[in-house]
Amino acid sequence: MTEDTFISHLIELRDRLLRALIAVGLIFLVLFPFASELYDLLASPMLRTLPEGSKMIATGVVSPFLIPVKVAAMVAFALALPYVLYQAWAFVAPGLYAHEKRLVMPLVVASTVLFFAGVAFCYFFVFGVVFDFVYTIAPKSISVAPDIENYLNFVLTLFLAFGVTFEVPIAVLILVRMGAVTIEQLTSIRPYFVVGAFVVAAIVTPPDVISQLLLAIPMCLLYEVGIVAARIFGKPARSPGEEEKAPEAGQERGP
């Protein structure tokens, strides 16, 4: 019986992974004809800072084709993310307690929104400030022509850094809800967090003070937001014994 239950869980996991991959693949097929336009949109913050008529370059043989395709795949995954997260939720939900179900879904939605908020903040604000600063102080004797692959790696790194940074309130709230830390402890370690934020920013951002400040300062502010959220919503959940448990593993799940 235990082996049958384990196999059924593996089969369900496979099915839900396939559904998620199919969703990403279908969106990618729709976006594929517009891959070049998507890259142009991604590159627009850089192009706005370059001299009029300047363009980016491709040093690889297949880069002009491969890089836009990567951008299209990235956008397809981002658009399919709500459905992907739903499949993950549907797989684990039957094994959760009732109080865990009430907590997990709002956290998943909030963390997704915050991640994309971090990416949007990076695209619409940080890129413009950083590129203006970098190319304003660049020597006039050089011709600036960024490589498209290097640019993609750069923006993906910053997207990930700012997306994760905007998850700080969620991390703080979860730690308090789990009872791992108290609000008083979070308040007492505030100076250490500020120092850590600047250290992390110095590691994950380019070696310029502007981008480091633009990452470290929001991280510190979001830490304060997390403390406020923990004061409001951070009451530790009741023990599992006080809740009616969800259906046992192996019980038939919904589609």
Image: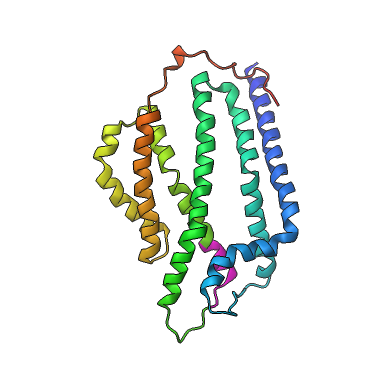
Q: Nearer the viewer, residue 250 or 211?
A: 211
In the figure, 175 relative to 204: above or below? above
* 110 sits left or right of 185 in the view: right
Q: Residue 255: within the magenta?
A: no
Q: Nearer the viewer, residue 137 or 145?
A: 137
* 65 sits left or right of 128 in the view: right
Tell me which residue sits at (38%, 24%) in the image: 236
Tell me which residue sits at (54%, 66%) in the image: 45
In the figure, 37 relative to 241: above or below? below
Q: Nearer the viewer, residue 177 or 4?
A: 177
Badge count: 0
Q: Residue 153: within the magenta?
A: yes
Q: How is the image coloured?
A: rainbow
Q: Position of residue 70 (x, y in %)?
A: 64, 59
In the figure, 104 relative to 214: above or below? above
Q: Nearer the viewer, residue 198 or 122?
A: 122
Q: Position of residue 142 (x, y in %)?
A: 48, 84
Considering the image in quadrants, where does the N terminus appear?
A: top right
Tell me which residue sits at (61%, 48%) in the image: 78
Q: Position of residue 176 (x, y in %)?
A: 36, 31
In the figure, 186 relative to 46: above or below? above
* Secondary structure mostly seen in the magenta stretch: helix
Considering the image in quadrants, where does the C terminus appear?
A: top right
The magenta span reads 145-154
Residue 153 sits in which quadrant?
A: bottom right
Q: Position of residue 225 (x, y in %)?
A: 37, 41
* 2 sits left or right of 131 in the view: right
* 229 sits left or right of 103 in the view: left
Tell me which residue sits at (62%, 63%) in the image: 41
